[in-house]
Amino acid sequence: MRPHWSLDPPITFLNHGSYGATPRVVQAAQQRWRDRLEAEPVRFMSDELPPALDAALASLATFVGVSRDNIVLVENATAGANAVLRSIDWQRGDRVVIANHGYPALKNTLRYLAQTRGIEVIEAPLPWPITDATQIVDAYVGALDGARLVVIDHIFSPLAFAIPDDALAAILDACRARGVKVLVDGAHAPALLPLQLDALVAQGMDWYVGNCHKWLCAPKGAGFLYAAPHAQAGLHPTVISNYFGEGFQREFAWCGTADPSARLCVPDAIAFLNGLGLPRYRSHLKTQAADAARLIADAWQVQLGAPLDWCPSMVTIPLPIDEAASAEGVARWRNRLLAEHRIEVPIHPLAGRLWVRISAQVYNELSDYEALARAALTLR
Ligand SMILES: Cc1ncc(COP(=O)(O)O)c(C=O)c1O
């Protein structure tokens, strides 16, 4: 599969998770959109873009199981989550819950709201390593009292696991019982998890953000924001532009002049994955991630941090080194693996030590993970 991507041949690329990587066929589709735009920019933006965006949205809506009216395209999950969090009429002392391992960008948005609007941020204390789904439920539910909103990471970035469906349902139940609003951050979920977002609303979810540029393999700059019908009033993009006050769909369709080609390629990315066979894609990634993690954990004689069954495409594994976690260690290990072994893999500081997060993608081979297993041992 590797020739379908334009990844640098000498690099062992084990980090699809951070920014995705776009197949050549989707890159070519993006170039065609750019060519059309530049041939007649005014005609494109005024006449061709609205129906093209509509078609992209219709295809994405079907893919994530939602009515077309409840979803908009945004540049990325951060933009979608910021739109939700910064549209709420916060009162001083309102409480918002996010996990200790929640995505740092969204924790910063909440920190900003704490400084500017006086909200109180409560961390749901997820243990790491983790063995049991009740630990996830207990961490969130134990933090919900008096909360106005909870932000739930569907797949945790550093921990690489997805909250199992029954645990997510239990958390949503607890939120509904307490009248707590729910924003799910599903940055990694599209294409990895079989999303049925309208069904999650019935369980108590209000908003969901996702990225198409990670596992759906769209070009960078393609994400979405889903808002349940009852949660669309008062919801605005963080950039207010020409269509302010004209409704959820119109406002988000235009946030000022920008290159829309990544968003327009979402149907091409979906077609690429459908060509591979979506169920086959999902099961291949999950199996390959698990096989790779077992291989590495055996070589390094370490224990994994979470059950492999929760990991759709990435696994976080402790490095076999006796070194305390530090920002400097994170940078040094990533740089050494890249410079000395040409392996691109992210390092995370967790529970006092350093961990690698491997990604499995169809362009990877088991030999890529064998290379990482060997390399870390030689670097000790
Ligand atoms: C859980 C989670 N949320 C949000 C993001 C942010 O994604 P983006 O930078 O595309 O907005 C990421 C990116 O890795 C993530 O893992």
Image: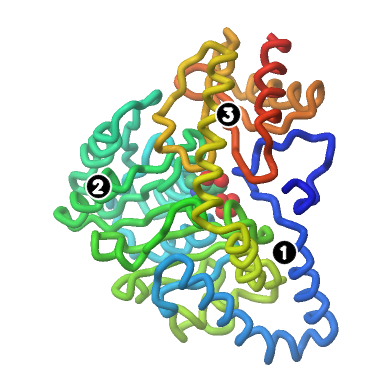
**Residue contact at pointers 2 and 3, CB within 8 angstroms:** no
- The image quadrant that residue 8 belongs to is top right
Dot 3 corresponds to which residue? 292
Q: Residue at x 29, y 74 (%)?
A: 230
Is disc 3 placed on a helix, strand or loop? helix
> Along the horizontal axis of the image, is 176 left or right of 252?
left
- The mark closer to the camera, 1 or 2, is 1
Labels 2, 3: front one: 3
Amino acid at dot 2: Ile
User: Horizontally, is 304 left or right of 379 in the view?
Assistant: left
Task: Specify the quadrant of the image occupied by residue 232.
Answer: bottom left
* Quadrant in the picture for the C terminus: top right
Reading the image, the residue beneath label 2 is 171
For image coordinates 25% across by 52% down, the residue present is 172
Residue 105 visible? The answer is no
Q: From the viewer's perspective, is residue 260 above or below residue 142?
A: below
Circle 1 is placed at which residue position? Answer: 26
Q: Alpha carbon of mark 2 to alpha carbon of mark 3: how far?
A: 31 Å
Residue type at mark 3 is: Ala
Mark with earlier residue (1, 2): 1
Q: Which residue is located at x 34 percent, y 32 percent?
A: 126
Is the residue marked by circle 1 packed among few (<14), some (14-19), or many (20+) residues within 10 Å? many
- Residue at image location 34% in from the left, 43% down from the top: 164
Viewer-closest of 377 and 233: 377
Query: Whole-percent x and y of residue 132?
Result: 29, 30
State which mark lies toward you, 1 or 3: 3
In this rendering, position of residue 131 left or right of residue 50: left
Q: Position of residue 286 (x, y in %)?
A: 50, 41
Secondary element type, mark 1: helix
**SS class, disc 2:** helix
Residue 186 seen in this snapshot: yes
